[in-house]
Amino acid sequence: MPKEGITPRDQDYSQWYLDIVRGADMADYAEVVRGCIVFKPTGYAIWEAMQSGLDQRIKATGHVNAYFPLLIPKSFLMKEAEHVEGFAPEVAEVTHAAGEELAEPYVIRPTSETIIGYFYAKWVRSWRDLPVLINQWANVMRWEMRTRPFLRTAEFLWQEGHTVHATEADAEQETLMILHDVYGDFIERDMAVPVIKGVKSEKEKFAGALRSYALEAMMQDGRALQAGTSHNLGQNFAKAFDITYTDQNNTVQHAWTTSWGVSTRLIGALIMTHSDDEGLVLPPRLAPTQVVVVPIYKNDQERSTVLETIERLTADWSGRLRFKIDDRDNLTPGYKFNEWELKGVPVRIEVGPKDVQKGSVAMARRDIPGKEGKQFVPQAGLTERITELLEIIQQGLYDRALRFREERTFTVSSYDELREAVEQGFARCYWAGSTADEKRIQDELKATIRVIPLEQPDTAGCCILTGQETTQQVIFARAY
């Protein structure tokens, strides 16, 4: 049975998602600021855990963090034609300050290629200055018309890496390294979300990029969610902002640049990949609280005995487990169980007077609701047992999501099969169509090429639309 206040997924998936965000106390609508949300402590704690996991990986690959201005001269955005065309509909401008009209408007950062390109042109002089490997954690604003918490808001949080290289090969290596070793590793290992890695089509690539790579994940309604992107910008921005260096032959060359980013939409991906009709389900590696301990007692004597036992059991947990002891006296155990289930805490430990006498505890796992996920275990060795269970839950969530994706991914060979497949999930097919052909499918089926997978077949086939022979397969899906 669904938890009270949560719309079942199979009844209204969109409302289910909003009910999870509200019920788990993750965010609130910022009604006074159009299209924005307030990250409540639970939601922000998840983002902090994501930041930590990503930041460690980014720094481990030799990148450093910096920060650039929020306001960007409008003229900067105009320098790269494809870029300005791509972002113009989403840009918010600042035209007045201190009671006066500005000589030149500023745009509120929709992305930072232009402002960072300006400074890189100042900083890069010689081949000895390369590569430049900088990341920033920031907020951006894109004037979205249809918003949904975490997935699409006017203001959101993200990291954006911007690098400069001497050659196209170096830039390409950087782009793919971020895709695999940073984003792919984090999303699959820490978030337990399986992804398909690939190249974006010309129609879907980042405005101004030479090539865009992406990671696509399948949500529980069969739709795709772009979990991260890594762009080889070629020399487009280097030429627009005159990012040049003198090579070893004393010849002036334009540099090659990249940009890459993931945002707080990863929180939306986390919710929609793992959660159920009981509430939020969090993978242990990202759960702000991995274990909650709920004491059960009826009087002061039982309370004292139970809490003493809990204190002994948790004595060595600090630094090993992120845990809370819920000893609030004004709430019933049942209320507490409900609250922590709704917030997605992976493991719940219950300790009552009988458990004290028997030397046991009740241990419930959030990924398997109800009696099936609950067992009584000895107090001896409890820490190790919980640690092992958290790893089992982490892997189990990934395996479950991967099975779901595989069950809802269809290899199709006709337009009718494509039409049917995108109603349910991903459609994998041969493709040799044009951008206009892709636009036609988007108009007719509301589906786009999510990625051209990096893993391609050895044999040729016929394009789903044109019938032309090709060795290229793509993934079509409806997307968030």
Image (cartoon, rainbow, N blue to C red):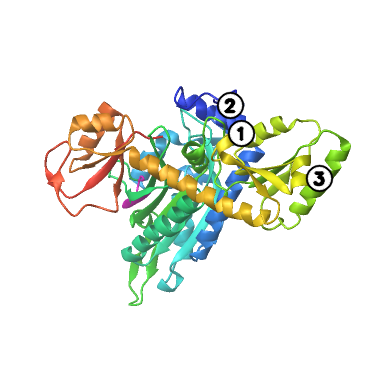
N-term-proximal mark, 2 vs 3: 2
- Residue position marked by numbered label 1 in the rendering: 342
Most extreme residue toward the right, as rendered? 301
User: Where in the figure is residue 427, as x and y percent of width and height?
Assistant: 28, 38
Q: Type of residue at label 2? A: Lys
Callout 3 crowding tier (Cα within 10 Å): few <14, some 14–19, many ≥20: many
Cα distance in 3D space between marks 2 and 3: 29 Å
Residue under the point 79% across and 49% down: 309
CB of mark 1 within 8 Å of CB of mark 2?
Answer: yes
Residue placed under numbered mark 2 in the picture: 3
189 on left or right of 235: right
* Stretch of the chain drawn in magenta: 206-214
| Residue 126, quarter of the rendered image | bottom left
Q: Is residue 180 left or right of residue 99?
A: left
Compare residues 467 and 238 and report the one nearer the observer. Answer: 467
Specify the amino acid type for callout 1. Answer: Leu
User: Tag 1's secondary structure?
Assistant: helix
- Labelled pair 3, 1 in contact (Cβ < 8 Å): no
Identity, as a three-letter code, of the amino acid under mark 3: Leu
Residue found at the far bottom of this picture: 249
